[in-house]
Image (cartoon, grey):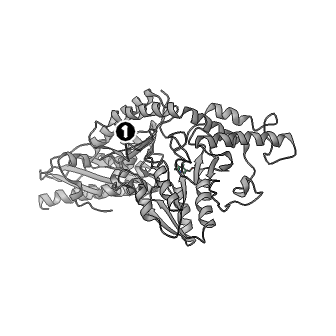
Amino acid sequence: MTLPIYLDYASTTPVDPAVADKMMECLTTSGKFGNPASRSHVFGWEAESAVEVARADVASIMGADPREIVWTSGATEANNLAIKGCAHFNVRKGKHIITSRIEHKAVLDTCRQLEREGFELTYLDPDESGLIQPEMVSAAIREDTTVVSIMHVNNELGTRNDIASIGKVCRDRKVFFHVDAAQSAGKTPIDVEEMNVDMMSFSAHKLYGPKGIGALYVRRKPRVRIEAQIHGGGHERGMRSGTLPTHQIVGMGEAFKLGHELLESEISRITALRERLWAGVADMEEVYLNGSAQQSVPGIINISFAFVEGESLIMALRDLAVSSGSACTSASLEPSYVLRALGLNDEMAHSSIRFSIGRYTTKEQIDDTIAKVRRAVEKLRELSPLWDMFKDGIDLNQVEWSAH
Amino acid sequence: MAYSDKVIDHYENPRNVGKLDDKSKFVGTGMVGAPACGDVMRLQIQVDSDGVIEDAKFKTYGCGSAIASSSLLTEWVKGKNINDAEQIKNTEIAQELALPPVKIHCSVLAEDAIKAAVRDVRGKQGV
Ligand SMILES: Cc1ncc(COP(=O)(O)O)c(C=O)c1O
């Protein structure tokens, strides 16, 4: 087996070879290299038609009209465009925005910027299973609320919010609803009509497409208007200027088309792998699943291994490419704000691992992963004075630690 | 994070992992750090009647550098008189293991641990 085993598909995915082939057709003289905005010759027309095929493929995964898709550089830009663009456009109606504490930084930092500009933010706390409930949104909406931004699938936990119900609350209360769907496209069904979504962000590289391309869905009926954040030649109906990167767009289109076709079969295949992984480690003592087990996508599973320290766990799991619940580059370990928001203490957050399973994960890889994880956790517990104390029946919360 | 070969060696093959009899008056225990900070070290030394360290054991909850710092320390203190052992400086540990600046605190913790263990055994012996 080639090592390390890649189990970080929520971070990014390799480009599907079929996608790479399509992209290659849009680069060189023999291909569709023209500027899609060139109206006066065949090079432009060819590129434009490739872009429109891709637009239809992306629209199709969410049941949208292709004219509702705006190309961006990724989900980060789509989130910025949606939230800032909609908040600014509707500033006369109000300056209150609602989001959650467990959004991706691309949403949270955008909201922080709006706070600096004088907007008022409400950050909803998730329940202990990592979900934002429609009632929480409903209770937070005020007279001056203009935008609600809640993610579909959380990138650290894999938890899946009930977007349709939250969308209904927003629609009833006449508030614009933005959803960060970077982690959900091709992982769980999406329907912008059923879900009452006004704006939705997507990224190609989470679904076997290239990095550096994404899209924002912007509803036409009833029309949602946003202020552009990047000004220039008026591309994308003025919402996002800049020459369209044909190869990137075609890559995203092909990736989303494949992702859409494979949706059902991938859900069942990956669910089986996830269950296998969980069954393989859950019988160890003091192992906890973070986030809702029921309301989640199968590809992301977040597990805490109590009494082992996160960084040494990552070190012991060198043959696995996984993400940890802490940022281990800084002197003071930063526990994940998502896990903290679930109520995990720092130690538990530090000893958490996110395994994300994808298109190229095999059963053999999962079995190997289970063996490696068990060995690492056993070894580190053998080394851990906290494990000794736990086994001696000492309550670690009662111990007076020498802070440093 | 890139670890030095010495850190990896101690991490892969930690020396002197274990526990000594806490109740013995010849055993000193130093427990330093806090779970919330990401590292806890327990260092134990067993001394003879002249104060020479006959045995040392550790257990550490922490990153690879913390594990390596405490493992190395147990090797260094064995055979030393407690008066010499408590003179070990964190900089010597950091240098030996080529710890990067963000990991210096692991060697500081190891220094704290041996000092605490020596203090404990002195207290037990009433000297
Ligand atoms: C939930 C979520 N939103 C936004 C992003 C950012 O996407 P992109 O890398 O396309 O900017 C990511 C990925 O890192 C994500 O997981």
Residue B115 location, quadrant: bottom left
- Under mark 1, the amino acid is Glu
Compared with residue A334, is residue A30 higher up or lower down, i.e. above or below? Answer: above
| Residue occupying image coordinates x 63% and y 31% | A17
The reply, left or right, for residue A132 in relation to residue B45 is right
| Residue occupying image coordinates x 30% and y 55% | B35
- Residue A397 in view: yes
The picture places residue A342, in percent across and down from the top left corner, at: 37, 54
- Residue B78 in view: no
| Residue occupying image coordinates x 62% and y 55% | A77
Compared with residue A304, is residue A221 higher up or lower down, i.e. above or below? Answer: below
* Residue nearest the viewer, comparing A196 with A125: A196
Compared with residue B20, is residue A234 higher up or lower down, i.e. above or below? Answer: below
The picture places residue A73, in percent across and down from the top left corner, at: 65, 50
* Residue nearest the viewer, comparing B34 with A82: A82
Compared with residue A269, is residue A287 higher up or lower down, i.e. above or below? Answer: below
* Residue nearest the viewer, comparing B108 with B118: B108
Residue B120 location, quadrant: bottom left
Residue A59 location, quadrant: top right
Q: Which secondary structure lies at badge 1?
A: helix
The reply, left or right, for residue A18 in relation to residue B9 is right
The picture places residue A377, in percent across and down from the top left corner, at: 32, 40
Question: Mark 1 Cα within 10 Å, few/some/many (few <14, many 20+)?
Answer: some
Pointer 1 residue? B12
The reply, left or right, for residue B10 in relation to residue B2 is left
Assign the C terminus of chain A to one quadrant of the image: bottom left
The picture places residue B32, in percent across and down from the top left corner, at: 27, 57
